[in-house]
């Protein structure tokens, strides 16, 4: 299988063009450390080998700040023909529910300008099959494994946490309280701060694993939910989940999705996501994983500046399975070009 | 399954909105099977965002041929690509048709459903099968590649809704007539869903093993997103959703839940 990843420096000419391009947009933002622009020779393949890409999310250490977004990465195996999974900052699998979830009827997808509307409905084989058939495969890889969970009740979240916490090879849980496509639970837990806090506390009470809570943007003030979840013990936050939306087929005069409503993702949502991350990062002390419309390293770097400690690539990977590797390489290249030693220097370094 | 940049060898408009695209893609052409598809980026920017899945119409000599209708912005962009330009594609993707040898086969194509069955007809003939190819369209203008089809050494049966060519009526009705006179070992179909449902019930009544190639809106094409599912019934008759991209696009006609 041919891999799509592009090794930086494999072609010095291309690489320099890339560097010049990347340098333009953010030049002059005065981000931390940019005062000492000891530019490295871009033609030196070993240049910047000492750059630190590692980040910490509470007790969770990632080799680099770029992970796939849950729901777009299947159970990892789908991407294996295209990329080296060991290069990712973390592996983040699709939402697991206690029982198998069949998902919503098709059509489940609709392309919109620069975006993708989906109503998958958390289709997954359930906890038992995950533990038996998916987890052994995922354990073979070195990046931390983050398992995303959703329950129909607070108790189900707790049970999922207890059972996954007892399994081997899981580094953290991501709690999905923000799926717009299921009738029970899902987004209901994410829009009411007290409910979000109860779910968080239930999960924390059942496991010692770091707990990341994934927030929905479909609220009036996302910082209220973020603080409620932080107070309930969350170790990190991830945001944003998809934005609720719909599409209509004028020919048939019917909704484009069988579920009528769906969640919007892709480049179209990036400004909304960036704003949410910026606000939440200033409102809480726990680390934030930023996501929503990230396609390139430049997008990812903007999220870091806005305050995200790590980022996730979602919809872009569905179009280009190598996108996540390109983002990792691009961040490293940017650090080298800017003369920065550590990616953490960029986190929250936005100049207002 | 690979991601690569394929060079356009030829892009020919063979109807008002029908195009043939020949791509130089030896790595994909070498392993492509009838019924599989490729997933193409149709534009350079972020919009249109998603790839477009196109079934493989023909394959050989390091080339892939795609047959498609210009429907929207993506396919319009594709139709403007000239020889020498590069197209980003993933492939070959999906499960293709079951190939057999030395049998009597019926291939039933409705409209654009002719696309993958052309490649199947070629391979089936190479494997020593007798092939009856049933091809239906709304009218004479909707029929394409007739000479090329005949060149495959098949028996060609034509149907049009308006009777402007061949049998007047649905292609499944034309097939039904032959179904009584011939004993087919296997049947294959691709076309609009109602036609496929009719095909499946005819095949079931005649106890002919049948496969259909389905279409759904698709995002990744490699099984990650679970977006392109179709409803199937398992051996116990229970309904479940299967990815069209990796579980299909070719399915056992008897397993498909035609009511949705």
Image (spheres, coloured by chain):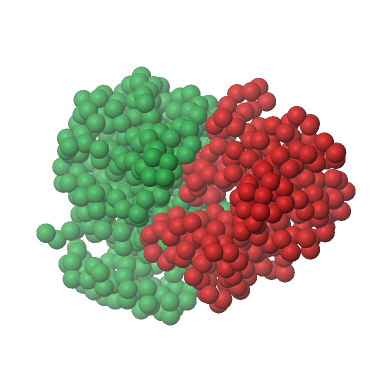
Chain colours: A green, B red
Residue A181 located left or right of residue B14: left
Q: Is residue B241 shown left or right of residue B147? A: left
Name the residue located 39 percent from the left edge and 64 percent from the top edge: B45
Q: Residue furthest left?
A: A352
Quadrant of the image occupied by residue B193: top right
Q: Is residue B23 above or below residue A213?
A: below
State the residue at coordinates (32%, 73%).
A21
Quarter that holds the C terminus of chain B = top right
The residue at 25%/25% (across/down) is A195
Q: Is A285 or A104 nearer to us in this picture?
A: A104
Please say if A99 is above or below A349.
above
Question: Seen in the image, is B15 located left or right of residue A225?
Answer: right
Residue B155, image x, y percentages: 81, 53
Residue A273 image position (x, y, % from top left): 26, 49
Q: In what quadrant of the picture does the N terminus of chain B appear?
A: bottom right
Q: Position of residue A52 (x, y in %)?
A: 34, 60
Instruction: Return the x and y of residue A200 as percentages of the image width and height.
Output: 29, 28
User: For this rendering, which residue is in front, B245 or B153?
Assistant: B153
The residue shown at (73%, 31%) is: B204
Q: A73 and B154: which one is in front?
A: B154
Q: Total number of numbered labels?
A: 0
Q: Check the image and report above or below for B219 versus A96.
A: below
Q: Is residue A63 visible?
A: no
Residue A332 visible in the picture: yes
């Amino acid at each position: 299988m041919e891999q799509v990843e592009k090794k930086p420096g494999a072609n010095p000419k291309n690489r320099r063009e890339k560097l010049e391009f990347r340098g333009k947009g953010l030049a002059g933002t005065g981000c931390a450390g940019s005062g000492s622009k000891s530019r490295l020779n871009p033609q030196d393949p070993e240049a910047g080998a000492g750059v630190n890409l590692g980040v910490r999310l509470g007790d969770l250490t990632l080799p680099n700040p770029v992970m796939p977004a849950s729901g777009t990465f299947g159970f990892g195996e789908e991407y294996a023909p295209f990329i080296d999974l060991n290069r990712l900052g973390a592996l983040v699998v699709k939402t697991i529910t206690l029982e198998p979830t069949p998902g919503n009827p098709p059509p489940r997808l609709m392309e919109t300008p620069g975006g993708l509307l989906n109503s998958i409905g958390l289709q997954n084989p359930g906890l038992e099959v995950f533990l038996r058939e998916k987890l052994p495969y995922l354990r073979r890889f070195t990046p931390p494994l983050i398992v995303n969970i959703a329950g129909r009740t607070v108790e189900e979240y707790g049970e999922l946490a207890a059972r996954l916490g007892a399994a081997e090879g899981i580094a953290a849980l991501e709690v999905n309280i923000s799926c717009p496509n299921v009738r029970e639970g899902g987004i209901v837990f994410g829009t009411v701060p007290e409910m979000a806090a109860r779910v968080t506390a239930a999960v924390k009470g059942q496991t010692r694993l770091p707990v990341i809570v994934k927030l929905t943007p479909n609220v009036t003030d996302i910082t209220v939910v973020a603080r409620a979840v932080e107070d309930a013990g969350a170790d990190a936050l991830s945001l944003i989940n998809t934005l609720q939306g719909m599409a209509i087929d004028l020919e048939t005069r019917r909704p484009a999705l069988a579920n009528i409503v769906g969640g919007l993702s892709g480049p179209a949502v990036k400004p909304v996501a960036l704003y949410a991350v910026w606000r939440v990062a200033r409102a809480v002390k726990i680390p934030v994983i930023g996501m929503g419309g990230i396609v390139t390293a430049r997008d990812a770097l903007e999220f870091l500046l806005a305050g995200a400690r790590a980022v996730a690539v979602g919809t872009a990977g569905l179009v280009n399975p190598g996108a996540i590797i390109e983002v990792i390489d691009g961040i490293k290249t940017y650090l080298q070009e800017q003369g920065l030693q550590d990616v953490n220097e960029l986190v929250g370094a936005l100049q207002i | 399954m690979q991601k690569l940049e394929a060079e356009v060898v030829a892009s020919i408009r063979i109807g008002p909105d029908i195009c043939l695209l020949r791509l130089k893609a030896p790595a994909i052409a070498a392993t492509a099977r009838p019924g599989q598809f490729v997933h193409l980026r149709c534009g350079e920017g972020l919009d249109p965002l998603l790839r477009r899945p196109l079934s493989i119409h023909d394959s050989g000599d390091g080339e892939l041929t795609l047959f498609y209708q210009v429907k929207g912005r993506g396919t319009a962009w594709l139709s403007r690509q000239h020889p020498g330009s590069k197209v980003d594609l993933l492939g070959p993707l999906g499960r293709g048709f079951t190939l057999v040898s030395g049998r009597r086969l019926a291939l039933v194509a409705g409209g654009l459903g002719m696309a993958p069955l052309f490649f199947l007809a070629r391979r089936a003939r190479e494997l020593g099968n007798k092939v009856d190819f049933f091809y239906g369209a709304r009218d004479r203008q909707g029929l394409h590649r007739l000479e090329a089809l005949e060149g495959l050494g098949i028996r060609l049966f034509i149907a049009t809704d308006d009777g402007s060519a061949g049998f007047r009526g649905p292609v499944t009705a034309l097939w039904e007539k032959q179904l009584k006179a011939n004993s087919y070992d296997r049947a294959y179909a691709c076309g609009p869903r109602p036609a496929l449902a009719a095909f499946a019930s005819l095949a079931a009544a005649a106890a002919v093993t049948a496969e259909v190639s389905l279409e759904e809106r698709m995002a990744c094409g490699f099984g990650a997103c679970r977006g392109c599912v179709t409803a199937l019934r398992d051996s116990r008759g229970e309904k479940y959703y299967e990815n069209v991209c990796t579980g299909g696009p070719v399915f056992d006609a008897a397993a498909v839940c035609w009511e949705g």
